[in-house]
Structure formats: C-alpha cells, structure tokens
Amino acid sequence: MRRLPPCLLPLVLVPVLALALVAACAAPPAEEKIETRVENPAEKLLLAGWYYEERNSPRPAERLIREAIQIYQASSDRLGLGHAYRTYGLFLRSAAVRRAAELYAEEGFLDPSITLDNRLAQSIAYLERAATLYEQEAAYGWVINAQLQLGYGHHFQKQTAQACAAFDRSLKVYQEHRASTEASIRLPPGESSYETFVAAMKDQSNCPK
C-alpha cells in the first residue's frame, strides 16, 4: 500500500481540521502528561494521533480516544463520535500498537472486547461504526475517507472482496457528492484524481477489472 506522511494520514480532511493536524505535527506538546490538561474531545483526538504516530506511545493515545468517545456519547454528538470511532479504528491497526504487543498482552485494551488477536477485525468494526454515523450526518467527505480506510483494513486482512467493495463505495460517494467534497480531498503527491488513486488501490488489492 502507498504510504502517506504520518501526520497527514487521512486522505479526506475538513479544511480546518487539516490545519489543526499540521499544527499539531509542527508543534508537539512539551510534556508527556499534557493529555491530562486537554478537555475538548476534538483536541483529545488530535493529541492521540500525535502520541501514537509521532511518539510511539499508544497508552496515552488510547486513553485520550476513549475519553473522547465517552464525551461524544454523553453529548449525543454523532459526528464527533464518528471521528472518535474512526480514530480508534486507525489506532488499533497502528504500528505503535503492534510494537506494544507485549504490553497489551499483559494489560489488555481499554475496550475489553479487543485482544491482540482480534484487533484488526475490531479496527474494521470501529471504522464501520464511523462510516454509519457519517452517513447519518450526511458528512460525505468523511464517508469517503471512512470507506477508503475500510478498504485498507480489509486489504490488510487479505479480504479481497470486502476491500474492493469498500474502495468502490468510497469512489461512488465521491462521484455522487463531488461538488460538496472536492475541497476536502487531499491527494498524495503525483495523483491526478481520486478516480485514479482508487484504481491504484484496487490494483494493489487484486480487485477484478
């Protein structure tokens, strides 16, 4: 799979959130325990991404994500909850979690239904929850991204049919809502269109022509 810069892993970003992500990457927190001072759930998710992508520190990242989930659930913020579920899905398949396998084998995840053996399947489950919430909120830019990330997830699990279907859904939503989502698409360097990018992803997953 083609790799993106860690700080800009999502391909589809609300412009304001994109700027916040860049700022978070450019100016990391100075203290390891800064998460205790962050109360806004959106900021918790941004900081969580920095912890597990840049600092290889999955434990504080997971705490922040679970706290954001609880806040969004309590406030019935479905779009925010979609972001939190999406972040947790990406976290579960991250290199930081893989490197901390011994720690998680001993202590487990904060969601007790997750184990090292099923974390990739659980990653897909959380991404599916995010996609559903984005659909309900008509947040089509985020639907495009969630389906793309589901395609990656199924690809990593060698689930070709499911990967191809997710890539197709991502492209279909993009084509149906191009006018409202075009500004939020961030393609990797060298890619001319979302259509060609998805076609390349499908080729790598051995999708039928």
Image (cartoon, rainbow, N blue to C red):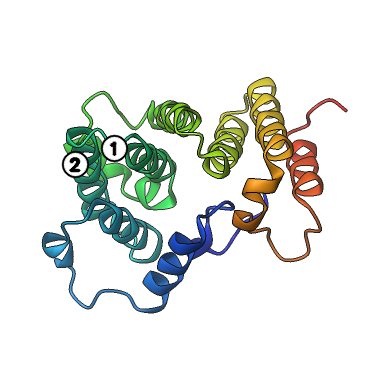
Q: Residue at x 74, y 48 (%)?
A: 194
Q: Give the camera-side residue of 146 and 49.
A: 146
Q: Residues within 10 Å of mark 1 (few under 14, many from 20)?
A: few
Q: Residues within 10 Å of mark 2 (few under 14, many from 20)?
A: some
Q: Quadrant of the C terminus?
A: top right
**Quadrant of res 171:** top right
Q: Residue at x 38, y 27 (%)?
A: 117
- Say above or below: 48 vs 203: below
Task: Indicate the amino acid at tag 1.
Answer: Asp
- Say above or below: 112 vs 5: above
- Say above or below: 182 vs 143: below
Q: Position of residue 188 (x, y in %)?
A: 68, 61
Q: Position of residue 185 (x, y in %)?
A: 63, 54
Judged by depth in the image, the label closer to the viewer, 1 or 2, is 1
Pointer 2: what residue? 71
Q: Are marks 1 and 2 in contact (CB under 8 Å)?
A: yes
Q: Position of residue 53 (x, y in %)?
A: 40, 60
> What numbered label is drawn on residue 77?
1
Task: Residue lying at the far front in this picture: please name it.
Answer: 179
Rounded to the nearest angstrom, the CA distance separating label 1 from label 2 is: 9 Å
Task: Residue lying at the far left in this picture: please name it.
Answer: 36
Q: Give the camera-side residue of 97 and 182.
A: 182
Callout 2: helix, strand or loop? helix
Task: Indicate the amino acid at tag 2.
Answer: Ile
Task: Judge from the rendering whether residue 13 lies leftward or rightward of residue 24; answer left or right.
Answer: right
Callout 1: helix, strand or loop? loop
Task: Judge from the rendering whether residue 33 lies leftward or rightward of residue 96; answer left or right.
Answer: left
- Say above or below: 82 vs 208: below
Q: Residue at x 50, y 29 (%)?
A: 135
